[in-house]
Structures are given as C-alpha cells and as structure tokens.
Amino acid sequence: MKISQKGLYALQAMMMLARHHHQGAIKIREVAYEENLPEKFLELILLELKNARMVESVRGAKGGYQLRRDPADIRLSEIIRLIDGPLAPFGDAEQLRTLIDRDLPHRALYQLFLDVRDAAAHILENTTLADLIAGPGPRATKGKRTPKKKEKGSVLPMVVGGQKGE
C-alpha cells in the first residue's frame, strides 16, 4: 500500500476539519495555514473530497469547507481510496497468494507479507477521523487555531511520491 503526498495532505486536511467540526465552515486559507499545506494544491484536494461528498462548501463571508458527515462516520480507508486508489490492490494480494502456493521454501515470508497487507487494510477500514482526533498527541487549543510546525528531515516511510496505481 502506498500513500502519496496528496493522500497525506487529504488526511491532514480532513483531520483539521474534524477537529473543528462543530465550528462551521473553515476557509481553505485557514486549513492550509494550520496544517502547513500548499493552498493551491489543497483547493484541488478539497474539490475532489467535495465531489465525493465527504466535505461540502459554504459560500459567503463565513464560507469555506466543512465535513459533510460526522467525523465518526468517515473512515480513513474512504479517504485513501478516493485519493490514492485501492488500499490493498487485488493484484498484490493475488501475487502473494501465488507465491505462497508455489515457493514452498519462502512460504512463511510471503504469508507474513500478506498478513501485514491485510492488517494495514483492516486498521484503515476500522479507524475513523473521530478516532484520530481523540487519540493521544497534541490537540488544537479550543477555539484557537495555531499552525503546526513540521520538522525538517522527518520522513513518513509509508508516504511516497507518485500517482494513483504506482
């Protein structure tokens, strides 16, 4: 499973909207600022999320974007599938099953890879935005939005550059 930079940005934006779910629409500029995301790229991501009916836009001076559903009803798997495609591509699973059947000396290794793939998919299917924002870690101060600081040189191993289907 690969999560692109676009997928990571989508997850970060959705988490921010989930944290401010009861505050109404949030302007793109505020989401970009708080999450330290490129505003123009975020516009495209939010449009894609809007077309998938995960967020909705509100016009006017107090307009912006907000979640269309409760954070407890939005699974991470939905977001990742929309932005990056299948969580666990069928071809990969099928290839692993073939290797398990044909390569007896390495069967345990391929079974382990299949189990890891299935476990990751299961976790994403069963984790909602509400779970993430309620989890351990720093939270946004109530009513006050502050930008996150990104550490230089930090790498998220699951995130890779590229397009859908790579």
Image: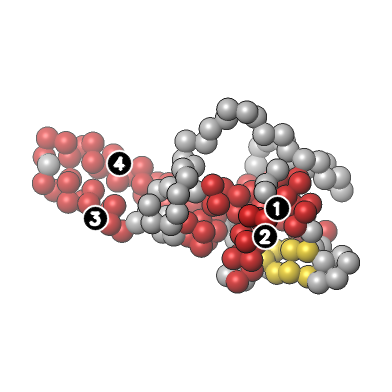
Q: In the picture shown, does residue 57 fall above or below 98?
A: below
Q: How crowded is mark 4: few (under 14 residues within 10 Å), some or many (20 or more)?
A: few
Residue 22 seen in the figure = no
**Does dot 2 land on a helix, a strand or a loop?**
helix
Cα–Cα gap, marks 1 and 4: 37 Å
Most foreground residue, 156 or 75:
156
Q: Name the residue under label 1.
A: 39
Among the two numbered marks 1 and 4 on one chain, the one whose residue lies closer to the N terminus: 1
Marks 1 and 4: which is nearer the front? 1
**Does dot 4 land on a helix, a strand or a loop?**
helix
Q: Which image quadrant for residue 17?
A: bottom right
Q: Mark 2 points at which residue?
A: 43
Q: Do the residues labelled 3 and 2 touch (CB within 8 Å)?
A: no
Residue 84 seen in the figure = yes
Q: Mark 3 points at which residue?
A: 94
Q: Which amino acid does label 2 sit on?
A: Glu
Q: Which amino acid does label 1 sit on?
A: Glu
Label drawn at residue 113 = 4
